[in-house]
Image (cartoon, rainbow, N blue to C red):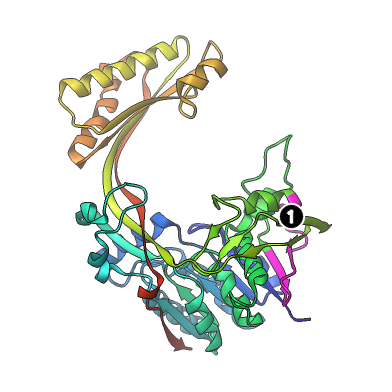
Amino acid sequence: MKKIRIGSGAGYAGDRIEPAVELMEKGNLDYIMFECLAERTIAIGQQDKMKDPSKGYNQLLEARMRKILPLAKKNGIKVITNMGAANPLSAADVTVAIAKELGVTGLKIAAVTGDDISKDIAKYYGNDVLELGCPLGEIKESVLSTNVYCGADGIIEALENNADIIITGRVSDPALAIGPLVHEFGWNVDDNPNQMGQAVLVGHLLECGGQVTGGYYADPGYKDVPNLEILGFPIVEIDETGKLLVTKVEGSGGMVTTDTCKEQMIYEIHNPEKYMTPDVIADFSHVTFTQAGKDVVRAEHAASHGRPETLKVSVGYKDCFIGEGEISYGGSNCMNRAKLAADIVEKRLKLIGVQMEEYRTDFIGYNSLYKNQISDKLAPDHFSEIRVRCSGRTKDRANAALIANEVEALYTNGPAGGAGATKKVSEVVSICSIFVPREIVDIKVSYQEV
């Protein structure tokens, strides 16, 4: 029976490269997927592209390609990644240039585009923004990027045209695995609902890299994970019926257990019965995990309910500025000095008329995670050190800077013993969503050979 093995080379834009190299050297892989594109990442990529039209792809693309292109060629592993971000065509150009520089030949490199609908976005200004409760047109002046969550169609087309390296923009994370599975096994939504559900499950288990092998799972003394410093990334072995095993390279750090798989399966899916992806609406409500050996888990019984009629558009927009400053107080009575510092800053901001939409004070070491309602009950009566963080949300950079400056001024104008002041102003790019008919997306695949 035909089986393929897919490895996960990255779970986010800045992930480690060593586990991917390990997988490509020792994992006996057919495919490796690199999931490197979060919602905010593509908006930032669009900003990079506006400054330099040749940029906008993942900032680690060059470093990763230098490591993986020789291994892809040597071991016949196809690479699928969304590292193209806002500029898959430039990402492909860079990849070709690196391959030539390294002397790696005989590779076909595909760039998948069509997710960026910014040229046509005015047609959808009347569409409601899911998170803001207003039409998109109300924030049109702030919009930076509009990228549709596409499915695996472009990846499948590229594989059918014998591409070895496939670089996409905004596709759903599971699509990076659904593409090769549909290509290899010929599954489709109508005839193979259970297999398509399993295909989404494969992508979902792999999309966060080390999270299914023990990363983001460890809790010392409660959920211990061995050798996280050499955490191995996951492999899924799956056959043409949809039966799949999750595992990792023998000797690598971490572990694959039914519990690590369960935690990853429920990660960010909202509704296990209707996990919406562009390719299919998956149903994970009957999935079972069985420990089939050390670091080997069998996953079964995912299903699906057809394709969604609309696709989600990730809209990046200029939202606000954050001005913030921090300063530390230590030793006897430090909490009271920290509170005095915070009180001074808040009064000063009113005196000088700083315009803010939102303001907060955190006492790090006391209430910066849980605020007072919980912290007052959990915290001890005495503190050895407190770091004050004052931050405010503003419409413009100038008001944000005033907040940061007032914290720094505590050095010589505030309580005794203030130290380690820092300040910064950040422009915040936020993400919201609209939905559009899936028919409007026009996927295109272009190819280069080296």
Residue found 28% across the figure and 67% down from its top: 118
Q: Nearer the viewer, residue 287 or 226?
A: 287
Q: Amino acid at mark 1?
A: Val
Q: In x, y percent, where is residue 232?
A: 68, 58
Question: Which residue is denoted by mark 1 in the rendering?
Answer: 256
Q: Is residue 147 above or below residue 428?
A: below
Q: In x, y percent, where is residue 115?
A: 38, 71
Give the left or right position of residue 360, taking residue 196 as reference: left
Give the left or right position of residue 242, taking residue 405 as reference: right
Residue found 36% across the figure and 71% down from its top: 87
Q: Is residue 430 above or below residue 314?
A: above
Q: Is residue 363 magenta?
A: no
Image quarter of residue 444:
bottom left
Quadrant in the picture for the N terminus: bottom right
Q: In x, y percent, where is residue 64?
A: 52, 68
- Residue 27 seen in the current view: no
Image quarter of residue 30:
bottom right
Q: Is residue 223 above or below residue 119?
A: above
Residue found 43% across the figure and 81% down from its top: 97
Give the left or right position of residue 228, taking residue 309 as reference: right
Check disc 1 and report its element: helix, strand or loop.
loop
Q: Is residue 238 magenta?
A: yes
* Furthest residue in direction right, as rendered: 293
Residue found 59% across the figure and 70% down from its top: 177
Q: Is residue 379 above or below residue 104?
A: above
- Residue 352 seen in the current view: yes
Span of residues in magenta: 235-258
Q: In x, y percent, where is residue 400?
A: 23, 36
